[in-house]
Image (tube, grey):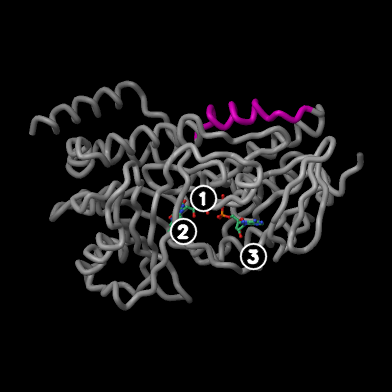
């Protein structure tokens, strides 16, 4: 059977556009054999705080894409708990607005020759011999392989009947002007306030610096990893905002969710690779942009291999994702979330707050580094001391 395309990518966010760009630039596939289908029209907004770790920025640069939209360099982090603040300065990556970044990435995909169909929400997927028939609001298309890059709500997952492995995280996000309380963001620092754990939450409140319409702004929000049900996330956000002089009654808020990547997360089906948040993201931070970009690179390699060899089970893709820097990182993060956010995580939280060494190690880990045994041993000792003290 002949197909309209070799690869149909469902979703034109960071995961989908990264897959498309890597397929053409890194794997040498003909651009006219790839299509990106997105239900939205760009520029489209994506509820997100827009922090991209350096890992993601580097992966884009390696494939010839430099971020050209307004961005704030993250120059360090502050961990906040009650009245205490632990501060570490280091280059961590950038903060962007997704409405701008994602529109640029769609332009970059088009610039390499890939067709991006907007307003083409996928509504049905049918398996046909050797491939798929994908129905969208803009008509149907056939393809040998599918890349599901359609995010937290992934229609592709639902249409393929894939069950959710884990509970999703919950978030709220908003942007405001800086207030007098913003003593970190005005210096390019990103704030993680763990005080919300006292409200029964499993996550953090954040303040990130951002450029809105050319002026400094602050992205604020709350992330609840939702390891166990309960918790009034919005109420906790209201209290955190009040401490910063922002009245929650005066802002419009919608709840959003994230899918964590955990042991047992499926990232492939016969003929299909899941990329980005359709597969899962970092459970401790709730972050997934860099992960989506890097996973796009791995997906492109395996799609190209399948096109060359005719294989279509993508089990090696699943293995390679797990073994990659981001895969290992996300699995460690799934483990860490339980250690840090549960009630029993108080010693770990105190260590992060009070120890420069622990925060420095956390920052190296955020950059994708594997921590040597000596560092892990020192952290374990610190944790033990923190539990006693
Ligand atoms: C409030 C909030 C704050 C966050 N903050 C951060 C942060 O600071 N840093 C970070 O790294 N991550 C953050 N995240 C997570 C991050 O936004 C996602 O992990 C990231 O966007 C994943 O990229 P993606 O390309 O996989 O999916 P998405 O960016 O969600 O893109 C999916 C695309 O698929 C399209 N689509 C959906 N359904 C269909 C369909 N049926 N047919 C065709 N197209 C479809 C959508 O229109 C969309 O363009 C946050 C998430 C939330 C909710």
Provide residue 35's location: percent of width, then percent of height.
Answer: 77, 52
Calculate the distance from the C-alpha at mark 3 to the C-alpha at mark 2: 19 Å
User: 10 Å neighbourhood of mark 3: few (<14), some, or many (≥20)?
Assistant: some
| Total marks placed | 3
In front of the other: label 1 or label 3?
3
Please name the residue that numbered disc 2 is placed on: 50
At 36% from the left and 54% from the top, the residue drawn is 75
Apparent side of residue 99 relative to residue 207 in the rendered image (left or right): right
Ligand 1 contact, mark 3 (Cβ < 8 Å): yes
Q: Nearer the viewer, residue 237 or 86?
A: 237
Apparent side of residue 106 relative to residue 224 in the rendered image (left or right): right
Q: Nearer the viewer, residue 324 or 256?
A: 256
Q: Is residue 189 visible?
A: no
Of the residues under marks 1 and 3, which one precedes in the sequence?
3
Ligand 1 contact, mark 2 (Cβ < 8 Å): yes
- Specify the principal SS of the magenta part: helix
Which quarter of the picture shows residue 39?
Answer: bottom right
Image quarter hosting the N terminus = top right
Calculate the distance from the C-alpha at mark 1 to the C-alpha at mark 3: 18 Å
User: 10 Å neighbourhood of mark 2: few (<14), some, or many (≥20)?
Assistant: many
As drawn, the label of residue 289 is: 1
In front of the other: label 3 or label 2?
3
Contact between marks 3 and 2 (CB within 8 A): the answer is no
Provide residue 277's location: percent of width, then percent of height.
Answer: 54, 47
């Amino acid at each position: 059977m002949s197909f309209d395309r070799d690869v149909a990518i469902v979703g034109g966010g960071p995961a989908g556009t990264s897959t498309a760009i890597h397929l053409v630039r890194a794997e040498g596939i003909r651009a006219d054999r790839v299509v990106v289908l997105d239900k939205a029209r760009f520029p489209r907004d994506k509820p997100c705080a827009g922090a991209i770790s350096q890992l993601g920025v580097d992966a884009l640069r390696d494939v010839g894409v430099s971020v050209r939209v307004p961005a704030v360099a993250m120059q360090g982090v502050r961990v906040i708990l009650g009245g205490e603040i632990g501060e570490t300065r280091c280059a961590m990556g950038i903060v962007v607005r997704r409405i701008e970044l994602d529109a640029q990435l769609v332009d970059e995909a088009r610039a390499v020759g890939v067709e991006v169909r907007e307003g083409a929400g996928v509504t049905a997927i049918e398996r046909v011999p050797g491939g798929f028939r994908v129905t969208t609001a803009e008509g149907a298309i056939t393809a040998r392989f599918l890349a599901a890059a359609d995010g937290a709500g992934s229609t592709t997952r639902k249409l393929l009947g894939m069950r959710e492995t884990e509970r999703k995280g919950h978030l709220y996000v908003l942007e405001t002007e800086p207030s007098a309380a913003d003593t970190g963001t005005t210096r390019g620092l990103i704030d993680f306030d763990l005080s919300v754990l006292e409200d029964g939450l499993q996550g953090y409140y954040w303040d990130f610096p951002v450029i809105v319409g050319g002026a400094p702004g602050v992205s604020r929000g709350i992330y609840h990893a939702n390891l166990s049900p309960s918790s009034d996330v919005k109420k906790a956000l209201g209290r955190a905002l009040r401490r910063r002089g922002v009245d929650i009654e005066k802002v419009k808020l919608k709840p959003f969710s994230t899918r964590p990547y955990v042991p047992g997360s499926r990232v492939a089906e016969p003929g299909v690779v899941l990329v980005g948040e359709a597969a899962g993201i970092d459970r401790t931070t709730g972050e997934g942009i860099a992960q989506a970009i890097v996973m796009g690179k791995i997906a492109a390699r395996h799609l190209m291999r399948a096109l060359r060899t005719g294989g279509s089970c993508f089990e090696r893709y699943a293995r390679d994702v797990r073994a990659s820097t981001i895969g290992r990182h996300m699995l460690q993060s799934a483990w860490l979330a339980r250690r840090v956010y549960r009630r029993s995580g108080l010693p770990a939280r105190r260590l992060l707050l009070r120890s420069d060494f622990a925060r420095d190690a956390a920052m190296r880990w955020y950059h994708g580094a594997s921590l040597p045994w000596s560092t892990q041993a020192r952290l374990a000792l610190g944790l033990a001391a923190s539990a006693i003290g």
